[in-house]
Amino acid sequence: MNAIAAHPPARGRWIPWVFVAGFLVVIGVNAVLITAAVGTFTGTTTTGAYDRGLGYGAVLDEAARQKALGWKAEIARAGGAVVLTVRLPDGSPLPADASVTGTLQRPLDRTALPLGFQPSAPGTWRAAAEVPAPGAWEAVLTVTRGADRLERRQRLVIP
């Protein structure tokens, strides 16, 4: 009996094809993820980024000025309305002679819904807010009293 004839034929020919199949799976998954990423890009970018960067010192100055006011603002959603409560540094409510303006915005597409605030209690303003779709909305509010101004942004999740 010949020694060569006693060995069975090679049974491991399929092993390299396992590696090829594994790489094909990785390439397929990457193709799906790249297609999803490119297809869902909203195109949201900042126009004039350089000019905005030059004015960043003014943004910091405004933040410091608002912090020096010491006003404490809380934004909440209650019963189909946006409610803003503002307190002075001593804890007393902000007088009703202040005016409040604002909008509800979608974070990505910047759909804006104007809000009409009316005083509802000492230091509290309320605006009816009927949103067209549930989800994340951002309340962008400005409180003005004389020369003093406070700007607040807060994310609200509306069911």
Image: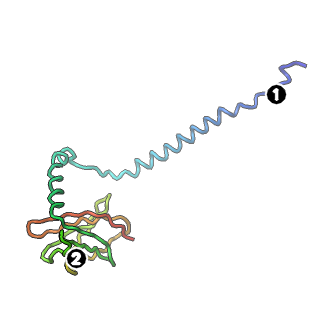
**Closer to the observer: label 2 or label 1?**
2
The residue at 14%/73% (across/down) is 98
Measuring from the top left, give residue 90's x and y in whole percent. 18, 71
Q: Is residue 5 above or below residue 129?
A: above
What amino acid is at disc 1?
Pro
What residue appears at the point 23 percent right and 72 percent down from the top-left corner?
A: 115
**Residue that numbered label 2 is attached to:** 124
**Could you give the CA–CA distance between mark 2 and mark 1, rounded to whole angstroms?**
88 Å
Farthest residue, direction right: 1
Q: Could you say which is closer to the camera, residue 31 or residue 64? A: 64
What amino acid type should be assigned to the residue bearing mark 2?
Answer: Thr
Colour setup of the view: rainbow
The percent position of residue 111, horizontal first and vertical second, equals 28, 63
Indicate the position of residue 83 as horizontal and vertical percent values. 27, 74
Q: Residue at x 45, y 45 (%)?
A: 34
Using residue 9 as the reference point, say whether residue 84 is left or right of it.
Answer: left
Q: Which mark, by number, is residue 8?
A: 1
Residue at 19% across, 70% down? 101
Residue 38: x %, y % from top left: 40, 47
Q: Secondary structure at mark 2?
A: strand
Q: Is residue 85 above or below residue 49?
A: below
Instruction: Report the side of 101 relative to 106 (left or right).
Output: left
